[in-house]
Image (cartoon, rainbow, N blue to C red):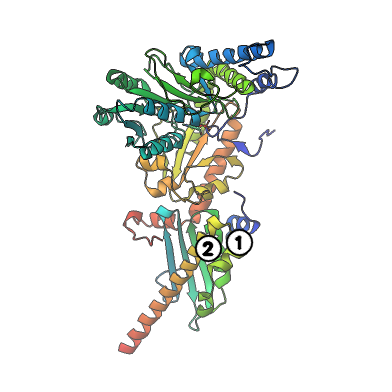
Amino acid sequence: MAYSDKVLDHYENPRNVGVLDKDDPNVGTGMVGAPACGDVMRLQIQVSEEGIVEDAKFKTYGCGSAIASSSLVTEMVKGKTLDEVAEIKNATIAEELALPPVKIHCSVLAEDAIAAAIADIKAKREAQSSQKESA
Amino acid sequence: MSSLNIPIYLDYSATTPVDERVAAAMAECLTMQGNFGNPASRSHPFGWKAEEAVETARRNVAELIGAVPKEIVWTSGATESDNLAIKGAAEFNQKKGKHIITMKTEHKAVLDTCRQLERDGFEVTYMDPLENGLLDLEAFKKEIREDTTVVSIMHVNNEIGVIQDVAAIGAITREKGIIFHVDAAQSPGKVAIDVDAMNIDLLSLCAHKVYGPKGIGALYVRRKPRIRLEAQIHGGGHERGMRSGTLPTHQIVGMGESFRIAREEMAAENERMRALRDRLWDGVKDMEEIYLNGDLEQRIPGNLNISFNFVEGESLIMSLKDIAVSSGSACTSASLEPSYVLRAIGRNDELAHSSIRFTMGRYSTEEEVDFTITKVREAVEKLRELSPLWDMHKEGIDLDSVEWAHH
Ligand SMILES: Cc1ncc(COP(=O)(O)O)c(C=O)c1O
């Protein structure tokens, strides 16, 4: 199967590979997929007090399109507010990478990873504020 | 100094290039000046000459497997041979019984044929292999029933290269009076076949895995005791009624020549393959978390099938773009299913998703193997750096204890 130049570029030079401290209150972690399905994505975002994504890191087990989708997402989320990040849809990712139909699930997984990372940071912040209230 | 031809071909179990000697023989059977006649034409020398070439090829194929030429039926390849053998024998003997035994690690040409027979009212038992890929003979004996008419077990597995003990299976089926079919598409030139000593009744062959052309194969059909088949392709009654259709002289001559060469060069070639295979395995076996799939001893020399844990097969193949290999995981199809052969030998999904099959052949060199070792090590290291599963493994997390969000 032929890969698009964009996929090859992200696959060969993946952006923002790495790990953020998942216990940091300002870090949201989303891990989606399953080894049995052949892909697992871990997306982490570092979010400022004002709700701006300052940094993002990923690691992905999966095919080239899955790796490229998550690499692209780390670039897309930086500098955006959480609300803006939540607006990123799989179709945008698929279009940007010119994914063929059989690889659309990779972009869906990337969207899921974003949602999971946002949910994680929101849960952390809620837990924090309720702690403050009760203190 | 380097004479590497990139990309390097290490997928000889998928198909082989045609040997130059074979191509030359085939080229002589096409044009007006060549041997183009219809082997079935009885009324002129064009037909006689073509028939002679076909019969020479038939002898060459028969000789490699210890058969007599009359027992060879030409087909379009191993898929057709498997269909003709299993459907033909099951249908012919259906008054006697409708039970078939095969294995879960068979090629789709056998498995899908059996599925079709199930739809037609036959009953099929699909045996699990042992962890090394081989058939458990004791378990097999227990599955044999009064109404079992056909047993179909492959000789050499196309993915993991393990060699079944067909002689032991044949001894059992012969004693019970059951027809024994063997898919030997991957065997010629790699493992000796003797249909009499092994008590094989039907044997599927093809040319394109032995440096012959694609689109030609044969089915060995035993004459003593005589095995009878229901024909699957009807027409002019060629091949003693078992497979109609004008014989493709050039294809048949190519198959015959490739089998002749295989017979003559098998011993030397196998030694060379074993050295290359060991060189490749020695070059990677110290890597962490890699698993050899299938028995190392009961295996053809040119095959290595390795799972690189925590790395996904398709991305590994993408990293190895200068090397033509195949992945157990059928990710390029929409199915995203890990190799059913590796699942059947008990590999978990991760390992089944992370396998690469390297198959070497006549034109493989030490230089190519060394290049492959370097590239594989680099690619696996790079992908593990990217892999969250590798991180978790390094942290000591048991991946089976994690609740994954299946979707
Ligand atoms: C074990 C086995 N059986 C059957 C086949 C099918 O052979 P063919 O492509 O000649 O029909 C193959 C090759 O793909 C094979 O490896």
Which quarter of the figure is the C terminus of chain B placed in?
bottom left
Going 55% across and 62% down the picture, which residue do you hit? A69
Q: Residues within 10 Å of mark 1 (few under 14, many from 20)?
A: many
Residue positioned 55% across, 35% down in the render? B11
Q: Is residue A18 left or right of residue B364?
A: left
- For label 2, the residue is A107
Tell me the element at label 2: helix
Q: Nearer the viewer, residue B56 or B44?
A: B44
Quadrant showing the N terminus of chain B: top right
Is residue A94 in view?
yes
Residue count near mark 2 (Cα–Cα under 10 Å), binned few <14, some 14–19, many ≥20:
many
Q: Is residue A17 visible?
A: no
- The reply to whether callout 2 and callout 1 are in contact (CB within 8 Å) is yes
Kind of residue indicated by mark 1: Leu
Return the x and y of residue B310 as percentages of the image width and height: 44, 51
Label disc, if present, on residue A97 of the rendered structure: 1
Tag 1's secondary structure?
helix
Residues B400 and B153: in front is: B153
Q: Is residue B116 left or right of residue A7?
A: left
Q: Chain of mark 2?
A: A
